[in-house]
Image (spheres, coloured by chain):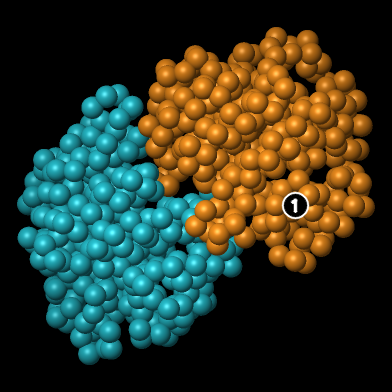
Chain colours: A cyan, B orange
Amino acid sequence: MTDLRQRPGAAGLFTGLSAFPLTPLRDDTRLRDDAVDEAALAGLVERLVDAGVDSVTALGSTGSYAYLTGAERARVARLAVEHADGVPVFVGVGDLRTSRVLAHVEGAETAGAAGILLAPMTYQPLTDDDVFELFRTVTEHTELPVIVYDNPGTTRFGFTVDLYARIAQLPGIASIKIPGVPADPAQARDRVAAIRAAVGEHVTIGVSGDAFAATGLNAGCDAWYSVVGGTLPSPALTITRAAQEGRAADAAAESDRLAPLWELFAECGGSLRVVAAVAEHLGLAPHRCLPLPIQGLDDAQRTAVAEVVDELALG
Amino acid sequence: MTDLRQRPGAAGLFTGLSAFPLTPLRDDTRLRDDAVDEAALAGLVERLVDAGVDSVTALGSTGSYAYLTGAERARVARLAVEHADGVPVFVGVGDLRTSRVLAHVEGAETAGAAGILLAPMTYQPLTDDDVFELFRTVTEHTELPVIVYDNPGTTRFGFTVDLYARIAQLPGIASIKIPGVPADPAQARDRVAAIRAAVGEHVTIGVSGDAFAATGLNAGCDAWYSVVGGTLPSPALTITRAAQEGRAADAAAESDRLAPLWELFAECGGSLRVVAAVAEHLGLAPHRCLPLPIQGLDDAQRTAVAEVVDELALG
């Protein structure tokens, strides 16, 4: 296995566990005023910092960035930095329109973000050149380092490794958040090595798709951009530290222990609805904290989530 | 063939040619202030009314609704109604978040819209129940009639006929905009008949996907929700009036004449980029009028578009 700590850049900002907190909403007035629950958000960020995560990524997909106004996003970014106690905060700035992305970048800069996370959101499908120019424009407009956010399940834009390589040459590109790795460890190592060869040593590679994280870290990924780590940081840190210290079997064992959670992700249409239900079960977020029209889990699913949280002692 | 004029409801508001104008943007300051070109928008709407379209749908996908702020959308809706000279204007109100949709509905009401068009935009994939509840909420909050907008190429949400039927039972549902029909006329009739049986006679069916329009209208669709009709209303009206008058062969012949345009749609990643290039070629919109990151066609594609427009005398 690669010793990540000996690779140039691997000890930097965009390594280890980056935890993605929810942005809980609270609806007091039947939809006319669904607003960010600022106290719940602050509590989630403080929980992550107390647990010892390496960074916090506010306004990731888990943080519902795509659903929030510019003013809400600027406020969430400020709150996250204020409550992070010096731990680096990355801020998601994606939007459908480039001029809006630039406005969100300004909000992140003002808040004191340590980096920005940019996904190519789509309504009209985008070409590779559209996406390259988006990243070029953003890197021209900010000094903040940029995480390239590849999340085809939400953006419906599929990056090729060639496009990773083109974008990685732009100034300020610091990391790539990949959507997952093959389940087979050898294939996962080949995949990470191929991306590394394409993007260069100056760009870290972060795995997402929580069920793939131990495999991805063991295969040489520098970081884990983690949904589950934003609500349940302790088991995510157990996996991350084991992989970083070369204890691949320990990382895999902790991931295997969480298999009932990964199964719920698969059964319930992805990680977001499940993690929101976990946070609600643990009293970390108000009931039905996701932005409508996302209704979240039904009662039977919530019961299943609560049982897994309690049985695995995840709270 | 069904005589559309003898079906209950078929002579109503949600029939015939509904033309979808672009919302042209103009970028005077390198992205920091890309703004709606209000004069160009007004000119496009007046062009449609002068041609005799049955309705104008502002802020459809062609009108880039998904890219615009609430304030921009309210302004576009007002301008469209002001320049429509009494022709009914429908207004797209889709957004990722239900509370934002309701704000856009208010903007449409204030503008004097005759109806609203609602697509279930997605970032996180939505369930059928999420989408049903979105439509339920919106119909509870407005007296305006609602067009259900099924456009999986942009929203990535796929409606089933069963979901059409559930939503059609909500108060105020007036029409369904379907993404296309099978190319075979008999299969197209079967498809339209199956949807009609599911949604009931009180809901009109409008075809979109311009290349399918003649087949769809000949197969019994009540309306054509038309991209090309928003910039080139004359040939769209030729097709629509022929189909409405039972001259199916004439409708098909005019659609066949436009085949080079449909081929450009297929080659250039959809209708929007091509229609924007047509409008720019004809001086109806400023150069590069689409919201970035959508760059629009390259120079070679623009030349091909101009040749088709000139050869077919579409200007």
**Which residue occupies 53% across, 26% down?**
B108
Point out residue B296 in the picture as x, y percentages from the top left corner: 66, 58
Residue A39 figure quarter: top left
Which residue corresponds to the image point at 39% horizontal and 82% vertical from the top-left?
A: A196
Residue B36 vs A9, above or below: the answer is above
Foreground: A227 or B1?
A227
Q: Where's the C terminus of chain B, which quadrant?
A: top right
The vertical placement of B314 against B263, above or below, is above
Q: Residues within 10 Å of mark 1 (few under 14, many from 20)?
A: some
- The correct choice, above or below, for A30 with respect to A232 in the image is above
Q: Residue at x 29, y 80 (%)?
A: A220
Closer to the camera, A263 or B286? B286
Frontmost residue, B105 versus B248: B105
Residue situated in front as seen by the camera: B211 or A305: B211
Q: Position of residue B79 (x, y in %)?
A: 62, 31
- The residue indicated by pointer 1 is B280
Image point 58% across, 29% down: which residue? B78
Badge 1 marks a residue whose secondary structure is: helix
Left or right placement of residue B222 versus residue A268 in this view: right
- Residue B207 left/right relative to A222: right
User: Quadrant location of residue A111?
Assistant: bottom left
